[in-house]
Image: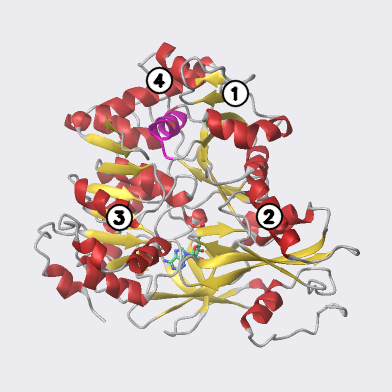
Amino acid sequence: MALQSIQKGRASTPVEPNLIDYDGTCSSFSWERAQKEELDGLPAGGLNIAHEAVDRHAASLRAEHLAIRWLGRKGSSRDLTYGELSQLSNRFANVLRELGVREGDRVFILTGRIPELYVAALGTLKMRCVLCPLFSAFGPEPIQARLSRGEATVLVTTPALYRKKVEAIRSQVSSLRHVLLVAPQSGEPIPEGTMNLGSLMEAARVAYTIPLTDPEAPALLHFTSGTTGLPKGAVHVHQAVLAHHVTGRFALDLHPDDVFWCTADPGWVTGTSYGIISPLSNGVTCIVDEAEFDAERWYSILQDQGVTVWYTAPTAVRMLMRAGPELPKRFDLSRLRLIASVGEPLNPEAVVWGQEVLGLPIHDNWWQTETGGIMIANYASMEIRPGSMGRPLPGVEAAVVRSEEGGSLEVIEEPDVQGELALRSGWPSMFRAYLHDEERYRKCFAGDWYLTGDLARRDADGYFWFVGRADDVIKSAGHLVGPFEVESALMEHPAVAEVGVIGKPDAVVGEVVKAFIALKPGQQPGEDLRLELLGFARKRLGAAVAPKEIDFVKSVPKNRAGKIMRRLLKARELGLPEGDTSTLEDDA
Ligand code: AMP
């Protein structure tokens, strides 16, 4: 179904899309040329994300342009121009330098969406340190695992988050040298071993020159979940800014006067690539909302801030759909020009709902932590096929592939055949490593192709359609959750003998995390124990990761190698055929 024509009829769409001739642009596009035309490069040499995102605008007529409008949870707000953001991030870079932090050291930020997060993120990049923002809804265990694996040198956090989530695990992170606390109440004693970031910022110099930065120097570290083992730390380099910038222009259609709202938290890759880097590099105004989802609040932000381009997620769209079609009628959303969504499958009904209720279709796009930026998208100028992720970005080659015996790969040319989604390696924001895990990184590639772990098909017109994940990771409210991380936390409870964790389909959040638990001999299943285990997991893992449902089972199905058969648990949960169970251990 084509929705483009209705979209064209909207009164407030005088803006010509950046990408009009898709096929022509794809055939003539080159990343080298895009870099020359779109980016600045450092005066000192090389390429630095923070320079492209902030300093080049601060040194131009755009210095007074609003870079970030922050909306506080309780009604306060704060505006930062490009000039101010440049100076504040300079100060933060100087704070790091004064502390003796060095190039390549890892700076973690656990603050929630507050202005200091954006300042610290950009200052970290200026210092050529590696930025790792963490989601504030993580509990102490995921935080500790990531700080340790990422060998954090610095942690920027708030007094409340420090006390609740970090203090108890700090001694387990031997690399952590500095904990900088944002905005402790005046007169409030700060915990031992921490420093007041506000005082350090006041004392720091405003002048800072970004040193020569190797475009291949690590810049960003994003943890993502796999099926087994510890979370994987995907490493991105400064060169990624080229993809952030170009995808912002092509897929999000950013124009200089746009007011852009990315609803993702920077603790997840979308909130960094598109909540910070891409929009700033494109010189637009970013809205940052500190609060969590609330349908009425969101519509009033779209109206009051005059949002023109809105980047959100299917779970949020489904929650808005639930809030009903009457609510948005109370708001003037006529400034909105483009709505885009990412992170999980976007139901075709959601695309149509956008058109009918908000007056604009929702443009789905696809990418993942490892790709660093949008790879496949429905563009502003193109026909949307509801349910499809769209077509590959100019400069990106995507294919559906089949692994052959002996490890080689066959690219499936025939349309509408399912296989694994693969991307030809070499785009600028491709991850360059999994931290401390060379083998896992290598396994993601077959020759020239990066294997995404997603199953997809391509239609005859080149649109890609998501089919499912090739592995057991769970997508809940747009966030990847590794079943192993949840199983490991539950195993720490003295009553638990075995755990298997799956994603159970859910109409709003895509999947909810569900755990199947076998108890130790002598332990009685019951409501009290179930609630205790839910609370136990939530305290350790945090709301974003903890299971929402627990079932007790006699034993957890495992294969003869002792591996939990999560697919079987899922099939049983959903009443589906159990498939091949020949490797099932006898007693399960
Ligand atoms: P993450 O690395 O947390 O961003 O998760 C990436 C994964 O989210 C992808 O590999 C897909 O499984 C899923 N995903 C992202 N965007 C889409 C989309 N538009 N449609 C379906 N699944 C998506």
**Magenta portion: prevailing SS class:** helix
Residue drawn at x 67%, y 41% as measured from the top left: 149
Any part of residue 41 in sight: no
Residue 197 relative to residue 530: left or right = left
Q: Position of residue 358 (x, y in %)?
A: 22, 65
Q: Quadrant of the N terminus?
A: bottom left
| Residue holding disc 4 | 91
Q: Are marks 2 and 4 in contact (CB under 8 Å)?
A: no
Real-space Cα distance between discs 2 and 1?
27 Å
Q: Is residue 121 magenta?
A: yes
Name the outermost residue toward the right. 522
Real-space Cα distance between discs 3 and 1?
40 Å
In the rendered structure, find residue 296 and report the number of the disc placed on it: 3
Tell which tag, 2 or 3, sits nearer the viewer. 3
Real-space Cα distance between discs 2 and 3?
35 Å
Q: Are marks 2 and 3 in contact (CB under 8 Å)?
A: no
Real-space Cα distance between discs 4 and 1?
17 Å
In the rendered structure, find residue 485 and report the number of the disc placed on it: 2
The residue range painted magenta reads 113-124
User: Which badge, 4 or 3, is on the more N-terminal residue?
Assistant: 4
Mark 2: amino acid: Glu
Mark 1: amino acid: His
Closer to the camera, 232 or 75?
75
Q: Position of residue 491 (x, y in %)?
A: 78, 56
Tell which tag, 4 or 3, sits nearer the viewer. 3
Residue 294 relative to residue 222: left or right = left
Q: Are marks 4 and 3 in contact (CB under 8 Å)?
A: no
